[in-house]
Structures are given as structure tokens and as C-alpha cells.
Image (cartoon, rainbow, N blue to C red):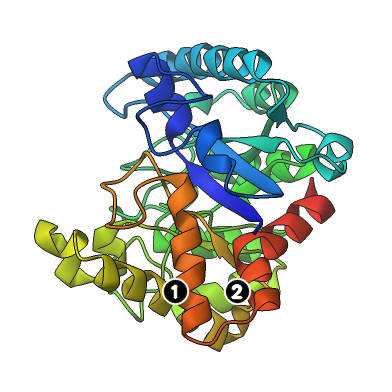
Amino acid sequence: MNYFDLHCDTAYEMYTQKQKLAKNTLAVDLDGFDAYERKAQIFAVWSENTKSAGDVYGDFFTILEYLKGQIAENSDRAVFCAEKETFAADDRRLKILLSVEGSRLIEKDIARLDILREYGVRVLTLAWGGECEVCGAYDTDVGLTDFGYEVVERCEALGIILDVSHLSEKGFWDLANVAKKPFIASHSNAQSICNHARNLSDTQLRTIISHGGIAGVNLVGKHLSRTFEDAEMIMDKEAALDAVSKHIVHFMEKGCAKNVCLGCDLDGTHPLAGLERVGDIMTLAGYMKAHGADDALIDDLFYGNAYRFFEKNL
């Protein structure tokens, strides 16, 4: 089985806890990826919203240095992919791509985007929480600022893929109305299944598809089902598998069979029973096979859709 995930917070947790990429007590490590043949993971660099934007910008370099050091220590098992040639190579090592979660670190310095691109960032999740100089998150009614439109234009020019997960609804439509290139929702679920502000409406999903983008389903309990706000429900393995598969199936029913992916948000959320670690995601594939999904569909959902998108858009 192959595996491609659009979002994990392991880089931050690994750095702050001084854990190793090869084997750790987190949800994501190289040992866990041994369960898969071809595999790719987008590592998000995130820092606390309580810090100043300048400190968050500094944290980016510190966390990235630690992550790249871990990749270097395991160069026989993992490779950092900043260019299409490395990403598309016939290589069974874990292919690691880099994103930034939240655009606060840019402040109002557009040149920082060029620097982030130089350091390997290929995806920018515009928002996380609250407001910044670029946009507002899902917990606000703030869209793109004037500077935010400049950020969109510069990212598209640089080849940095924009990510609408966490973005406000107004911000989503501001972006959709000006985007000239595909954009993604790296870790967002279906609002029709679970009415949470972090999730995507069917209209938003169709808009992402019409722009050539992809959407990754996450494993955040409160984004899967309102009943999962009861912590005991998250310990119910069957309920967890059923909830995740319902969001995937809903996306497929809305014409997203070639656009839906995984964006598990491992190490960024409380774990679901049976899906605590990266190697456990095979359980979800098995559950979906038992409920009628064939091998070709599983490969698309768990790897192929995301791989084809990045092969084309890196």
C-alpha cells in the first residue's frame, strides 16, 4: 500500500520535545512509514499564536534546521523534496515536502515569501487562528487584506501552493475569486457531515475542484462528528473509522473521487482509536475495502490523487 498525507504537525512537536525522526513517541516517525511502499508526507512548520510574528518567523528557521538535521541523519530512509525532479524520482524513501501553517510570520514583508521559497516551502496555509496582516481564520469574519492579495499574487508567481484550511469563509471566497492557479484544503472535512466552521461546504469543495485543487480529510474528532466532543467516543475504534470514511465518501459523492486525499493532522490533534500513528492508517484502508472500495480507489485516496497533484504543480 502507498501513502501520501497533506498535513502533520510533527516538525514542531519533534523539535520542542527533542525527539528523533527515525523512531519516537509521537504519531509520525520513519518506523511507521515502513508499513508503506511509496510514501510522501507534508510536514507543516507551525509556532504558537501567542508569540509575536517576528518570533514565529525566527522559529521557522529553528524548527526547519532541526527537521533537516533529522532527515540528514536518515538519508537512506527519507529525502527532502523542494524540486519536482527529486519528488518525481523513482525512490522508495519517504518524500518530505514542507509547508508553513499560518501566514503571521510574513508580517508585512512580501520578500519573506521569496526566502521561504528558497528554504523549501512549497505550501502556505494562509491562516491558523485569529487575524494577521494577510487574512483572518475561520474564527473571524475577516477575509484577505489588501496585503493578503499581494501575498496570493506573489505565492502564485513563486510556485507556492496556497492552502485554505483554517481560512475564514470570506477569505476562501476572496482567494477563489482571484486565484489563477490550483489551491488546496490540506486538512478539512465536510461541513454537510459535521457542521463545524473549520469544515468545507459542498460549494467550497466544488470550487476547489473547479480550480484543479485537492482536499485532505483530517482525523480531528470535533471536525468529524459533534458526538466526538465526548472524549469517550474517540476511543471507539469502529465509530472513528466510520466517521472518517463518511467524510471521504461524501467528498467522492460530490465529484471529488480524483481530488480527495488524506490530511490527517497527526501530532496536531488528539488521536482517534485505531488511528493513533501513521502506520495505523492502513486500518482505515482495510475498513473502506471491507465496505466496497477496490484497490484502485484506495490507491487514489491514500496516495495517487495527492501524488498526481504535486507532480503537476510543484
Q: Position of residue 309 (x, y in %)?
A: 74, 58
Q: Callout 1 environment at 10 Å: few (<14), some (14 to 19), or many (20+)?
A: some
Q: Nearer the viewer, mark 1 or mark 2?
A: 1
Residue nearest the observer in this picture, 284 or 211: 284
Query: What amino acid type is highlighted by mark number 2?
Result: Thr
Q: Name which residue lies at 70% across and 38% down.
A: 95
Q: Callout 2 environment at 10 Å: few (<14), some (14 to 19), or many (20+)?
A: some
Q: Name which residue lies at 75% across and 51% down.
A: 310
Q: Quick check: 21 above or below 196?
A: above
- Secondary structure, mark 2, is helix
Taking the image as shown, residue 50 lies to the left or right of residue 78, namely: left
Q: Which residue is mark 1?
A: 287
Taking the image as shown, residue 269 lies to the left or right of residue 168, namely: left
- Secondary structure, mark 1, is helix
Q: Quadrant of the C terminus?
A: top right
Residue nearest the observer in this picture, 140 or 214: 214
Q: Quick check: 210 above or below 222?
A: below
Q: Quick check: 274 above or below 30?
A: below
Residue nearest the observer in this picture, 119 or 287: 287
Query: What amino acid type is highlighted by mark number 1?
Result: Tyr
Q: Name which residue lies at 35% across and 29% down.
A: 25
Whether residue 180 is visible to the viewer of this picture, yes or no, is: no
Q: Which residue is mark 2?
A: 207
Taking the image as shown, residue 153 lies to the left or right of residue 189, namely: right
First in sequence: mark 1 vs mark 2: 2
Residue nearest the observer in this picture, 101 or 262: 262
Q: Quadrant of the N terminus?
A: bottom right
Mark-to-mark CA distance, 1 and 2: 29 Å
Q: Position of residue 27 (x, y in %)?
A: 39, 39
